Image (spheres, rainbow, N blue to C red):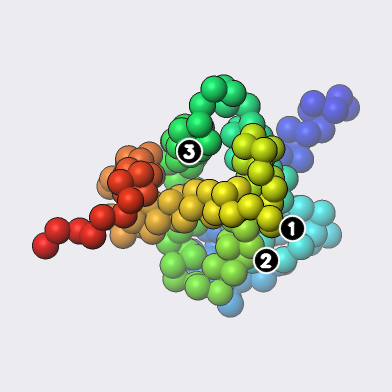
Amino acid sequence: MTSGLRERKKLATRSALHAAALHLVAERGLDAVSVDDVAERAGVSPRTFFNYFPTKDDAVLGLDPADSALVAERFTARPAGEDPVTALRAVQAGQAAAMAEEPEGVWPLRLRVIDEHPVLLARLHAAFGASERALADAVAARTGTRVGVDAYPTLLAAVAGVALRTALHRWLAADFTVPLPRLVDEAWDALAAGLPAPRP
């Protein structure tokens, strides 16, 4: 088996386990679903399940730890002449478009399940936190600043995370009828304007 085929099979198995966990929890509730249920729905053994996810909650969220570096990598790949905010806005615009277009409406279902089971938020925030730390390092490298010493890299990475999370909350509240990229753009517009108070 070639390495490319092996990787595709691993990705397909991971996706099947995530879809099984997410749909089962949406149908039955978090406490009524076991690892064995998820493995059976995905057509694999419980042992195989643990090759991909450490817990049921991780399978429900389906977030790959390797993805925590993706935003930082995309930010680093932006043209060198872009200021950090412009570069980050462009990265998040692409990220939002990809999230909105995921097959089978994965992100909307994921957000609904998280909304119904707030205990999952801790794991989601941990994933976002890892992404923000990697992004802070990338911002520091681009701006000649130091994480932990200078405010800018950590602050910008955190603000970017808040912009995305705010857009996701609004997307859920609007029952996914408003395009996610537009909501992300509105969050950045408000930040760029200095967060003026809404007019009554």
* Separation (CA) of disc 2 from disc 1: 7 Å
Residue highlighted by disc 1: 53
Q: Amino acid at mark 1?
A: Phe
Count neighbours of disc 2 (C-alpha within 10 A) and say few if under 14, some if 14 to 19, many if 20 or more.
Answer: many
The reply to whether residue 144 is in sight is yes
Residue highlighted by disc 2: 56
Q: Which x, y percent locates residue 111?
A: 45, 58
2 and 1 marks in contact (CB < 8 Å): yes
Q: Amino acid at mark 2?
A: Lys
- Residue occupying the point 35% across, 44% down: 192
Residues 149 and 83: in front is 149
Which mark sits nearer the N-terminus, 3 or 2? 2
Farthest residue in the right direction? 1
Residue 31, by quadrant, is bottom right
Q: Amino acid at mark 3?
A: Val
Residue highlighted by disc 3: 85
- Residue occupying the point 31% across, 54% down: 195
* Separation (CA) of disc 1 from disc 3: 34 Å
- Residue occupying the point 49% across, 48% down: 160
Q: Is residue 38 above or below residue 12?
A: below
- Quadrant where the C terminus lies? bottom left
